[in-house]
Image (tube, rainbow, N blue to C red):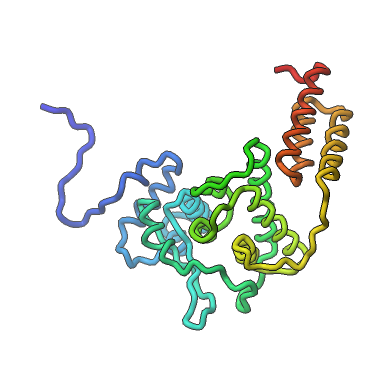
């Protein structure tokens, strides 16, 4: 007789069929998978909310953390609903056991237009937006300093994957903007960041998207800096860290942080010069 270790009862009612994609996804926690399975066992018109689940499965903070995990993994999507007058009402949360199905059925069918730049019913979330900008900057600087590739477009826009902007904004960019590179994105992002810091805009992502499409005129004029000036800046930063008492790896790390706003080519040029000097001086051993 064939051994059976997993016993499944055949049934014609009171059961749930769930795609193995979410069940076997090791990128999300067991807890997140458990909550997802509980929700997937509910009827399709069962409204998902933090409040409802926190009363059953724990506190609000715990449920919010799990929801964030599922959203980041691509199985959950939070959409801000609007009333007939166009005003914001409540958040609608969608869940699927298949990432692609969620995009096809919900995300791609939403009206992929940016929110009004200054929605009259919503006050700017300054603290949250500031943290968003910090997180985006961190990811962009990480990507800029870990690649030596020249500007190149990608139909997939892989560089967007880890940038913490909304799923809808990412989908907008992929569907409606051609030939976008990491360098182009960083340039527009930097200008949008300055507009926000100077109180010129409120809805950061809406302006970022419009600017990427070429539909936004920035009010802050950029000071034109020559390539030689940029090289001089990189040279001074390089010399500063060469003369510092830090270890070789700390010198390289601090140099990259201080030059994050410079063109990738110049960063790489002077990073290589710094590494060469440290090796010749016996400070850096491979």
Q: In x, y percent, where is residue 105?
A: 36, 61
Quadrant for the N terminus, please.
top left
Count of marks placed on residues: 0
Residue 226 seen anywhere in this rendered image of the structure: yes
Q: Residue at x 73, y 44 (%)?
A: 263
56 above or below 238? below
Q: Residue at x 64, y 40 (%)?
A: 150
Residue 59 seen anywhere in this rendered image of the structure: no
Q: Residue at x 64, y 65 (%)?
A: 207
45 above or below 28? below
Q: In x, y percent, where is residue 27?
A: 45, 41
Nearest the viewer among 127 and 8 is: 127
Res 123 → quadrant: bottom right
Q: Residue at x 40, y 51 (%)?
A: 99
Nearest the viewer among 175 and 256 is: 175
In this rendering, position of residue 80 left or right of residue 283: left
Give the residue furthest to the bottom: 85
In this rendering, position of residue 223 left or right of residue 3: right
Quadrant for the C terminus, please.
top right
In this rendering, position of residue 26 left or right of residue 211: left
In this rendering, position of residue 131 left or right of residue 8: right
Q: In x, y percent, where is residue 109?
A: 41, 65
Res 115 → quadrant: bottom right
Q: In x, y percent, where is residue 82?
A: 49, 75
Give the residue furthest to the left: 1
Nearest the viewer among 211 and 153 is: 153
103 above or below 33? below
């Amino acid at each position: 007789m064939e051994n059976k270790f997993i016993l499944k009862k055949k049934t014609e009612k009171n059961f749930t069929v769930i795609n193995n994609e979410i069940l076997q996804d090791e990128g999300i926690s067991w807890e997140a998978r458990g909550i997802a399975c509980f929700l997937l066992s509910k009827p399709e018109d069962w409204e998902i909310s933090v409040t409802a689940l926190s009363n059953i499965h724990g506190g609000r903070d715990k449920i919010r953390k799990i929801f964030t995990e599922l959203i980041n993994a691509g199985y959950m999507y939070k959409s801000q609903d609007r009333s007939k007058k166009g005003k914001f009402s409540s958040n609608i949360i969608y869940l699927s056991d298949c990432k692609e199905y969620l995009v096809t059925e919900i995300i791609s069918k939403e009206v992929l237009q940016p929110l009004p730049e200054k929605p009259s019913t919503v006050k700017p979330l300054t603290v949250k937006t500031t943290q968003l900008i910090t997180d985006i900057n961190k990811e962009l600087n990480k990507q800029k300093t870990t690649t030596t590739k020249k500007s190149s477009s990608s139909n997939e826009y892989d560089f967007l994957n880890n940038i913490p902007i909304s799923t809808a904004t990412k989908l907008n960019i992929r569907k409606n903007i051609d030939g976008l590179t990491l360098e182009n994105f960083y340039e527009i992002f930097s200008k949008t960041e300055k507009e926000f810091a100077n109180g010129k805009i409120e809805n950061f992502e809406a302006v970022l998207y419009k600017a990427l499409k070429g539909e936004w005129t920035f009010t802050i004029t950029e000071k034109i800096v020559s390539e030689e000036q940029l090289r001089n800046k990189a040279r001074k930063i390089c010399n500063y860290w060469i003369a510092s008492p830090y270890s070789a790896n700390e010198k390289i790390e601090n140099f990259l942080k201080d030059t994050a706003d410079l063109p990738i080519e110049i960063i790489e040029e002077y990073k290589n010069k710094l590494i060469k000097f440290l090796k010749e001086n016996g400070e850096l051993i491979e």
